[in-house]
Image (cartoon, coloured by chain):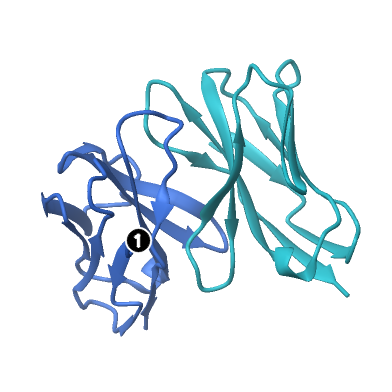
Chain colours: A cyan, B blue
């Protein structure tokens, strides 16, 4: 049972464009929604995260938009750069457990 | 800090052989997680420990998989006997405390190929 659905599976964006990755969750007990970035041959690393009482969080070129009523959240990468090419995972975690539930990942390629 | 250390980085073995993956978490971290990553199933949590005690092993696929954490600085994931469908990248991660806002730090992974 997949509790966090992520789309698209892959994404190609031109340099300078906006990359948008969407996630939807089912479990209303989720309390925290991090995004992880993974480069080839490396482990995932925390990129940005949001709590459900906030509708938006911005860190540099990366923004999370959160819609609690729709149970959806998305990652926006503004002014996408070739160095942003990586796989991005959304995730969710409840306050009563310590384990993350990951989405299936989005492979982003930013072209010149 | 050296980060989470995993060994070996690559392992190629034949079906039926025993495989042992090793992990050294970041010093001072109370939680240790083992994940498996495949193209088909993405990132799956296999098991996690708190203060060296296994808390949730519901993600361990079957009895062929076992994990131990004999002390705060070392954990192993063992597969015996290994099968081709176990081929994947296995990640170890660690974090501090039981605060859900604490970041999980991932190691570089072990790429396992079972022939």
Q: Look at the numbered disc 1 and give the secondary structure of its residue.
A: loop
From the viewer's perspective, is residue B15 above or below residue B99?
Answer: below
In front of the other: B15 or A77: A77
From the top left corner, tell me how far across and down residue B20 is, in percent: 20, 70
Q: Position of residue B5 (x, y in %)?
A: 30, 66
Q: Residue at the spot x=46%, y=38% of the render?
A: A100
Tell me: A112 left or right of B57: right
The correct choice, above or below, for B47 with respect to A25 in the image is: below
Picture quadrant of residue A90: top right
Side (left or right) of B17 relative to B38: left
Number of on-image labels: 1
- Residue at horizontal 29%, vertical 84%? B14
Quarter residue A27 falls in: top right
Residue located 58% across and 72% down the image: A40
Q: Position of residue B110 (x, y in %)?
A: 37, 71
Image quadrant in which the C terminus of chain A is located: bottom right
Residue occupying image coordinates x 30% and y 33%: B97
The residue where tag 1 is placed is: B3
Q: Chain of mark 1?
A: B
Q: Nearer the viewer, residue B96 or A97?
A: B96
């Amino acid at each position: 049972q997949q509790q966090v659905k992520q789309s698209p599976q892959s994404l190609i964006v031109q340099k300078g464009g906006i990359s948008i990755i969407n996630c939807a969750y089912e479990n209303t007990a989720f309390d925290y929604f991090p995004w992880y970035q993974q480069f080839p041959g490396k482990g995932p690393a925390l990129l940005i995260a949001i709590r459900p009482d906030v509708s938006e969080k911005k860190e540099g070129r990366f923004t999370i938009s959160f819609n609690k009523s729709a149970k959806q959240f998305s990652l926006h990468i503004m002014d996408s750069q070739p160095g942003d090419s990586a796989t991005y995972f959304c995730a969710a975690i409840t306050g009563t457990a310590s384990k993350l539930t990951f989405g299936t990942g989005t492979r982003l390629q930013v072209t010149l | 800090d050296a980060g989470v250390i995993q060994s070996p980085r690559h392992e190629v073995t034949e079906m039926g052989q025993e495989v042992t993956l090793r992990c050294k978490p970041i010093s001072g971290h109370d939680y240790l997680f083992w994940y498996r990553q495949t193209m088909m199933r993405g990132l799956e949590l296999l098991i996690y420990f708190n203060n060296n005690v296994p808390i949730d092993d519901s993600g361990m696929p079957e009895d062929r998989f076992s994990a131990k954490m004999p002390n705060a600085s070392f954990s192993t994931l063992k597969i015996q006997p290994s099968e081709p469908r176990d081929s994947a990248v296995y990640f170890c991660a660690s974090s501090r405390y039981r605060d859900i806002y604490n970041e999980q730090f991932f190691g570089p992974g072990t790429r396992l190929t079972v022939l």
